[in-house]
Amino acid sequence: MADARFLYEDHELTFPVVEGTESDAAVDISALRGKTGLVTLDRGFANTAEGQSAITYINGEEGILRYRGYPIEQLAEKSSFLEVAYLLQYGELPTKAELDEYEESITRHTLLREDVKHLFEAFPHTAHPMQILASATSALATYYPDALDPMDRESVDLGSRRLIAKTPTMVAWSYKYRVHQPYVYPDNNLDYASNFLRMMFSVPAEEYLADRVIAQALNMLLILHADHGQNCSSSAVRLVGSGHANLFSSIAAGIHALSGPLHGGANQAVLEMLHQIVKSGDDLDTVIKRAKDKEDPFRLMGFGHRVYKNFDPRARIIKKAAEEVLTSLGVDDPLLDLAMQLEEVALSDDYFVERKLYPNVDFYSGIIYRAMGFPTDMFTVLFALGRLPGWIAQWRELLGDPAAKIFRPRQLYSGADTRDYVAIDDR
Ligand code: ACO
């Protein structure tokens, strides 16, 4: 591919164009500052690739998402979450023997140290589970000094497996603490999703059998969330990892990044928005008018995406699944009808059409989670559980890349010019 040529002042500069697969290409401007003294200004990194990644391919114009080359639609229909976790981390689908070994090792690490219980109990019962999960994930680093060396493949592998195994237990326990119920220990005879559902919803006084429809839907939802390239939380994980912080600390940073309503927190925000619409009695035209009004901070939550300027393929799968799961569970949720009407009204409005604002992954996921029995503030935690293998894969990819550097963006300084210190009495 030809070099890119830029004209700056009176001379022409050339920069190599690096080719990816799938006709992706990037101008390598590594030498820009050295040649010109200039840096680039790119708010929100909308045009910037920090490095190369072989994990996930996204084509936002055509609504394509693939993990390691496999279309998300095929994985959502045919795979299991642990198989996808393996694929993301090791690059290939596992053989039967590899998957058996992987599942067995995840199963063996599901328990938490008993002392970790006290950590949960240090939080108020009202604490948001995302904050508890981030703190507990961070705390794991203190329990596993044998899995902290970011440059040691074996210890990283062990840490990764421990995280994938223990996170469902941490999530479920944060919920049990909140609702003043006894913690439920993992049952290693169950698959990943059923075990998690049991730890969440069973009580010692009664026998519990995870509903098959719910377990399958959860497996599919976790797969759909498993990776999404260099999004806000994955970039946070990579950034922290770039300083060679350990895996647990880096993942805790990702959980914090995901908690915001512009990112993973949007699934909770969608449900709150739908409730609010019902409560206010506003008709949908009023809601849409408010979303378009720049003076009003209200935005249509679950709509719009930095990368998808067509539909979000995950939203399409989830919308269909939401209808199927609700029908199968016999749930008639007026919020699903409201969400579908809202989508229809928005997608026929010029404002949304011109800006290419479509429903994203969060628009319908909350409706399914609600039908499955999850309280609203657990939705973002479920997103974190799903995204975990992606975060780990992104972190491992960066740490294993000999060309990787510590992330250290430049800035365009726009503060005061140099000035002399003024003694406090003279100000
Ligand atoms: N409702 C109303 N207007 C919107 C919305 C929305 N949900 N999203 C974007 N817009 C408008 C913006 O006001 C802007 O309008 P303008 O050009 O007239 O100024 C235009 O569309 C472009 O939007 P930006 O905010 O510049 O787009 P950006 O790529 O920075 O933001 C984001 C993407 C954060 C997802 C945004 O669409 C948004 O806030 N959506 C609602 C929150 C949400 O659903 N987040 C989940 C994203 S998916 C995920 O993280 C898993």
Image (tube, rainbow, N blue to C red):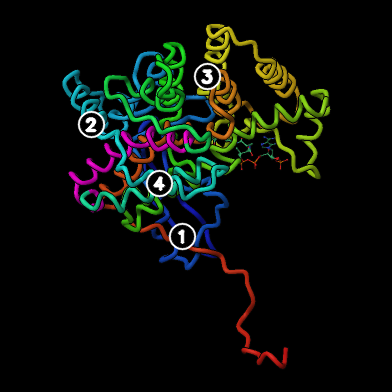
Q: Amino acid at mark 3?
A: Met
Which corner quadrant of the image does residue 158 belong to?
Answer: top left
- Mark 2 to mark 3 CA distance (whole Å): 27 Å
Which circle's residue, 3 or 4, is located before the other in the chain? 4
In the rendered image, the quadrant that contains the N terminus is: top left
> For residue 96, which numbered disc appears in the image?
none
Secondary element at image label 3: loop
Front residue of 17/426: it is 426
Name the residue type under label 1: Pro
Q: Which residue is mark 4?
A: 136
Q: Nearer the viewer, mark 3 or mark 1?
A: 3
Q: Which secondary structure, mark 2?
A: helix
Which numbered disc, 2 or 1, marks the residue closer to the eye? 2
> 319 and 275: which one is in front?
275
Q: Which residue is mark 2?
A: 108
Q: x, y (%) of residue 224?
A: 45, 25
Q: Which mark is residue 372?
A: 3
Q: Identify the residue position indicated by label 1 in the image.
A: 409
**Residue beneath the point at 35% across and 41% down:** 394
The residue most toward the front is 205
